[in-house]
Image (cartoon, rainbow, N blue to C red):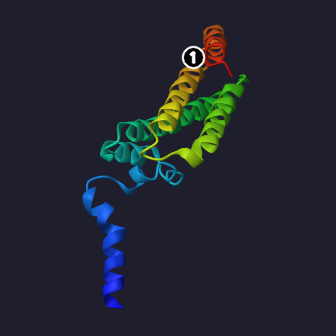
Amino acid sequence: MHSRIIGALLILYSGTLLAVDEHVACQHPNAYADYDADTLHSIARSCKVSEVADLYYHRASHIRQLEKYLLFEHKLNNLGDSENIAYIDTYRIHIGLAEALLSKVLAPDAPLALNRLNRIYERSGEIAELRFRGYDLIANRLQQWLREKSNI
């Protein structure tokens, strides 16, 4: 009985022993919900699969961008100024939908899904940043070009 328990423990922890310096979340790209941006950056630095590392970097950048946008919105509200900040919600919802749709296929050994989600983070972040800086026309053109290019 004890030998079975020990055998089971060795099997469970054998992957962990091989990747001692890699964070557990690197093996489970969907396990990120409770992490802040700094933790996501440290996880990304520890990941051995570059696509997974990029994904955690993008998630950290996404959190930082949202914090920046929400701080800006709060300051505008304090000044009594009204601004159309729907792009913040659009950005957040777009990333949330992409994460939800690709969550079942995300794994360290699924580079196509990881690359696709990384591209979505990059493009959405770029468009949101353009809108934040007031370059709505450029953001609209980039969004239209990406839509035409993707054939969706």
Q: Nearer the viewer, residue 61 or 21?
A: 21
Q: Quadrant of the N terminus?
A: bottom left
Q: Which residue is mark 1?
A: 130
> Image point 43% across, 41% down: which residue?
56
Q: Quadrant of the C terminus?
A: top right
Residue 85 lies, in percent from the top left, at: 69, 26
Q: Provide the secondary structure element on which disc 1 rests.
A: helix
- Number of numbered labels in the structure image: 1
> Image point 63% across, 30% down: which residue?
91
> Image point 59% across, 23% down: which residue?
128
Residue lying farthest to the bottom in this orientation: 1
Amino acid type, residue under disc 1 in the picture: Leu
Left or right for 115, reference 78: left
Residue 133 lies, in percent from the top left, at: 57, 16
Q: Nearer the viewer, residue 47 or 68?
A: 47
Residue 102 lies, in percent from the top left, at: 59, 41
